[in-house]
Image (spheres, helix red, strand yellow):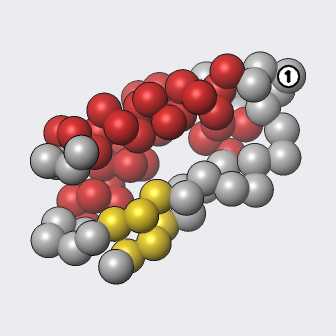
Amino acid sequence: MFCRKPNPALISADRWDEDAIREDLRATLRMTQGCAVELVMKDARTLRDQPWRLGRWCDIAREVCAEFGFG
């Protein structure tokens, strides 16, 4: 099992960038192909007063995982 804690700066940045989030997740999944992978978003201290960002990150993570045959 590989556990990855993605950089929370991507969901806390001034500018919301879904492409950067997708590429960060894809890079992890490319490097871990063939392994069981757990993605854990934590230490998100600020969401720029936009709590929807965390839910959207989860949606994006699910989409990217599906691209790699998970879930």
Any part of residue 22 in sight: no
> For mark 1, does the 10 Å Cα neighbourhood hold few (<14), some (14 to 19), or many (20 or more) residues?
few
Taking 9 as reference, is 65 left or right?
left
Between residues 22 and 59, which one lies in front from this camera angle? 59
State the count of labels: 1
Residue shown at the point (14%, 47%) measured from the top left: 69
Between residues 31 and 42, which one lies in front from this camera angle? 42
Residue shown at the point (85%, 22%) measured from the top left: 49
In this view, 46 is above or below 59? below
Q: Quadrant of residue 36?
A: bottom left
In this view, 58 is above or below 70? above
Residue shown at the point (24%, 45%) measured from the top left: 71
Taking 3 as reference, is 64 left or right?
left
In this view, 17 is above or below 20? above
Residue bearing the label numbered 1? 49
Amino acid found under the numbered disc labelled 1: Asp
Residue shown at the point (29%, 39%) measured from the top left: 64
Percent across and percent down for residue 4 are 48, 67
Identity of the residue furthest to the bottom in this view: 1
Percent across and percent down for residue 70 are 21, 49
Percent across and percent down for residue 11 are 64, 36
Quadrant, the N terminus: bottom left
Identity of the residue furthest to the front in this view: 71
Give SS at disc 1: loop
Q: Quadrant of residue 40?
A: bottom right
Taking 58 as reference, is 1 left or right?
left
Any part of residue 16 in sight: yes
